[in-house]
Image: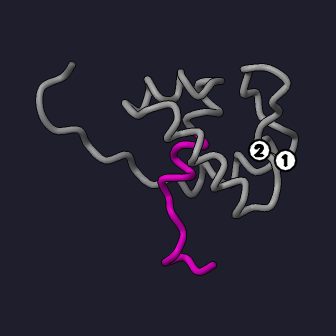
Amino acid sequence: MSKQDFDWTLIRSFLAVMEAGSLMGAARQLGAHQPTLGRHVAELEAQLGGSLFERPDADRAGAPDCRRRRPDAGRRRQPRPRRTGPAK
């Protein structure tokens, strides 16, 4: 996969789930839908070839491989787009 093919939205969603601890919390944080973030995480896992989150319950604490990758992902984070319009 080349840098041009990489979807930074997947990393943004992954980091939000890590920080919020759940898909629902990340959805609120990003103003996105929870199923969309679930698909982003699944796509990133498929691209990386491993599980990023332990799923015995609803907690998204992060699988060991996820915790190992997070510092690198944070350095590569692109700035969030600015929201336009009135605050909700």
In the rendered image, residue 70, in percent from the top left (x then y), is placed at 71, 46
Query: Quadrant location of the C terminus?
Result: top left
Which residue, as the protein is rendered here, is positioned at the far left?
85
- Amino acid carrying label 2: it is Leu
From which residue to which does the magenta span run? Answer: 1-15
User: Residue drawn at (65%, 55%), measured in percent from left and top?
Assistant: 44
In the rendered image, residue 75, in percent from the top left (x then y), is placed at 59, 53
Is 17 or 80 nearer to us in this picture? Answer: 17
Q: Which residue is mark 1?
A: 65
- Amino acid carrying label 1: it is Asp
Q: Residues within 10 Å of mark 1 (few under 14, many from 20)?
A: few
Q: Residues within 10 Å of mark 2 (few under 14, many from 20)?
A: many
Q: Is residue 16 left or right of residue 46?
A: left
In the rendered image, residue 46, in percent from the top left (x then y), is placed at 72, 59
Is 50 or 71 nearer to us in this picture? Answer: 50
Q: Is residue 35 left or right of residue 82?
A: right
User: Residue drawn at (40%, 50%), measured in percent from left and top?
Assistant: 79
Query: Quadrant location of the N terminus?
Result: bottom right
Residue 81 lies in the magenta stretch: no
Q: Are marks 1 and 2 in contact (CB under 8 Å)?
A: yes
Measured Cα–Cα span from mark 1 to mark 2: 6 Å
Q: Earlier in the sequence, mark 1 or mark 2?
A: 2
Q: Which residue is mark 2?
A: 52
Label 2 element class:
loop
Q: Main secondary structure of the magenta part?
A: helix
Residue 2 lies in the magenta stretch: yes
In the rendered image, residue 24, in percent from the top left (x then y), is placed at 54, 23
Looking at the picture, does residue 5 appear above or below residue 82? below
User: Residue drawn at (51%, 31%), measured in percent from left and top?
Assistant: 34
